[in-house]
Amino acid sequence: MDKASRGPQERVFGQRFACHSLLVQWGEGGDDVPNGGGDGEVVHGFPHLDTVRASITALYRRLSADGVRRYATSVAAADVAFDDEDDLHLGAQRVARALVHHLRLPEARMIVSFREMRHAASVDLAAGPEYFIELNDRFRSHRGDVGAALAHEITHVLLHRLDLGFPGTRENEILTDVVTTYLGAGWLLLDAFREDPVSRQKLGYLTPEEFGYVLAKRAAVFGEDPSPWFTSPRAYEAWVRGREEATRDERRPPLAGAGWAARHRYTKERRYGRAAAGLSYTFEGSGPATRVSFPCPVCWQRLRMPAGGRPARVRCAVCGSVLECDA
């Protein structure tokens, strides 16, 4: 991928990062387990939505629409199931192999171990084809969430091989969560979310609702319904809220699915060639506008089309989506 095809926040790795760690929030009886940056109550809502959307755009640019479609089927729960009766190390290796296969990583071998640590997990990317993943000792007795931790770390290996990343550690970790989810393994991270009056657990850098948002974006493209996969009631609630936010992306002018009030406002602003601050679309030309720029609701790539007030179809060059518009 040449420099001209990259987004403003996207870059390839020049220097290899030696280790990546998965953020975790654990708490029992009102006390937090140290997690290297996630202390306190679980954050909800959509505070990272701009980076989430930029991550989806970067993924499509790097893999292409055809490349993303190779991940049309999510990892099956049975493939990453890990019971207390299973041997700890053999079971972890089996789950890791299933995720390596799902993420289409040829000749990658994961060596999984357990130790006391502040984070949930970490991966050493200094060499290949063998990659060393360390999991927090807590997973010895919480084996059902081993797949979630491994999914994030193995996606780091995928991004490492793709030379895809963002500047800044936190932005790069958000990218990893988004790619894990969009390529069909991140529903495990959301299902690991639990929260009640006496305990809580959350893996990853996205909020639960942001995980739900990315899942909904994926579901819309591949026709999936992840709701039956959740074992955590709070994860299902976050999926529903994320789906609602994703649906709003499909109802923004100039898309034909926009509601009456949004359409009325758009028409008025087009007449003067000026959109209010904070809206997803912008105009070119003054009184009336001649062109409009707006994000593709699938991959969030910016698109441009004539602002003529007539129905039209627009094809996104990045994800290939054909959009019904009324500009």
Image: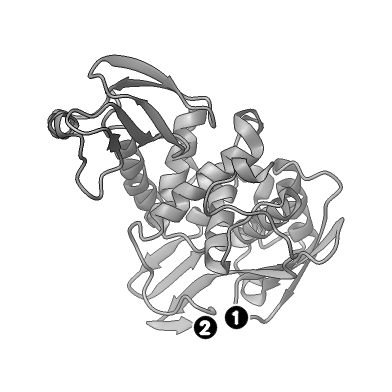
Task: Tell me: residue 314, above or below residue 87.
Answer: above
Q: Which one is earlier in the sequence, the residue at label 2 or at label 1? A: 2
**Can residue 86 be seen here?**
yes
Q: Which residue is at the front of the view, 82 or 178?
A: 178
Tell me if mark 2 has few (under 14), some (14-19) or many (20+) residues whose alpha carbon lies within 10 angstroms of its own.
Answer: some
Q: Position of residue 271 (x, y in %)?
A: 15, 29
Task: Tell me: residue 84, above or below residue 256.
Answer: below
Q: Do the residues bearing badges 2 and 1 touch, measured as CB atoms within 8 Å?
A: yes
In 3D space, how far apart are the residues under numbered discs 2 and 1 (Cα atoms)? Answer: 6 Å
Q: Position of residue 277 (x, y in %)?
A: 23, 49
**Can residue 225 be seen here?**
no
Q: Mark 2 — residue?
A: 34
Q: Which residue shows up at 54% across the image and 79% down it?
A: 36
Check the picture and name the quadrant holding the N terminus: top right
Q: Position of residue 127 (x, y in %)?
A: 85, 63
Q: Position of residue 135 (x, y in %)?
A: 68, 70
Q: Mark 1 — residue?
A: 118
Q: Which residue is at the front of the view, 234 or 211?
A: 211
* Amino acid beneath label 2: Pro
SS for tag 1?
A: loop
